[in-house]
Amino acid sequence: MKKLSILSDIHGNLDAFEEVLRDIESLAITQIFSLGDNIGYGPEPEAVIQRLATLGIPSVLGNHELAVTDPSELDWFNPVARESLRKTVDMLSEDSIEKIHQFPYCRVHDTYRFVHGFPPDSPVIYQFQISAQELEETFQTLSERIFFTGHTHYPEIIEYLDGRIERYEFPAGKRQLNPEGRYIINVGSVGQPRDGNNNAKYAVFDPETFSIELRYIPYDVEAVVQKILAAGLPESHATRLR
C-alpha cells in the first residue's frame, strides 16, 4: 500500500507549499491530500489553488473556502480575518473560485476520512471544542480507522483504543500507531503554524507499518512576510509567521 502525504492550512503561502512539495517529491510519494484552508491570510491564494489543480491534489472544503462559496459565512470570522478574506476573494480568478465550489466537505479513501475541522464533515468545528463523550460517539458512529483533520494549526493525535480516549501532542518525527486503535490525527499547518514552531508542517502516513510522521520543513519566512505586507493584508498575518 502506498504512503500518503496529508497537508492542511496552506493559507495562500505558496513558498511554504512549494518547499513541502519538494520534500514530498524527495520521498517519492504520489498520493497527496489537502484538508482545506488552502487560501486566506497568505499573499498567493490564486497560485496555491492553481498549483493544487495542476498537480491533481484533491482537497476538502476548509472554513476559509466555505466563506468563498457562501459569503454569509463571513460573519463567523473576526473583523480582521473577515477583511482579509474579502481581499483574498479579490485575488482569486473566476476559475479558482469555481474550483473551490467543487471542494467536498469530506473525502474517504480506503479506510481513512479527510475533513478540515471535525468528522464526519465539518469545516468549522475545532477539535479542542469536542468533549470526551463526543469523541467516543464519533468513533462509535463512524467506521473509518483514521480521521485526518486540520483547522487548529496545532498537531495532535487522539487515540481510541479498548473503549478509552487518549490525546497526545504530535511533535516532529515518526509515531507508531496501534493497529488495534482508531485515530483522529491533526496534521498541523503548512502555511501558518501556531504551535510555537514556524516551519511548514505536514504528515506522512504509511499504511503498511501503520505509522504517522510529522515533518518540519523550513522555508523563507521573511520573504512571505514581505509578500503579505505588499499585498495589503493585515500586518498580524505577517508577524504571526515569525
Image: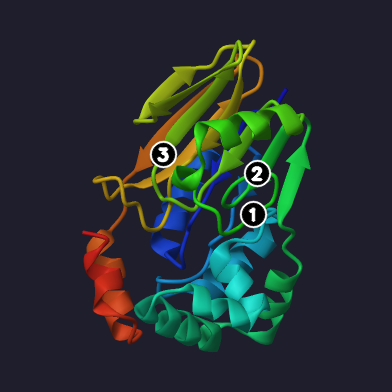
Check disc 2 and give the amino acid type. Pro
Q: Left or right: where does residue 153 sit relative to residue 101?
A: left
Element under disc 1: loop
The CA span between labels 2 and 3 is: 16 Å
Q: Is residue 179 above or below residue 194?
A: above
Circle 3 Cα neighbour tier, 10 Å, few/some/many (<14 / 14–19 / ≥20): many
Asked if labels 1 and 2 touch by Cβ distance under 8 angstroms, the answer is: yes
User: At 42% from the left edge and 64% from the top edge, which residue is drawn?
Assistant: 13
Instruction: Return the x and y of residue 195 as percentages of the image width and height.
Output: 30, 45
Q: Is residue 61 above or below residue 175?
A: below
Q: Is residue 110 above or below residue 192?
A: above
Q: Left or right: where does residue 81 sit relative to residue 6?
A: left
* Quarter assignment of residue 142: top right
Element under disc 3: loop
Number of residue marks: 3
User: At 60% from the left edge and 17% from the top edge, which residue is drawn?
Assistant: 210
Asked if labels 3 and 2 touch by Cβ distance under 8 angstroms, the answer is: no
- The mark found on residue 119 in the picture is 2
Instruction: Return the x and y of residue 197 as percentages of the image width and height.
Output: 26, 45
User: At 56% from the left edge and 44% from the top edge, which residue is drawn?
Assistant: 149
The CA span between labels 3 and 1 is: 18 Å
Instruction: Return the x and y of residue 216 as percentages of the image width and height.
Output: 35, 39
* Quarter of the image where the C terminus is located: bottom left
| Residue highlighted by disc 1 | 122
User: At 59% from the left edge and 39% from the top edge, which residue is drawn?
Assistant: 148
| Residue highlighted by disc 3 | 155
Check disc 1 and give the amino acid type. Ser
* Quarter of the image where the N terminus is located: top right
Check disc 3 and give the amino acid type. Pro
Camera-side mark, 2 or 3: 2
Element under disc 2: loop
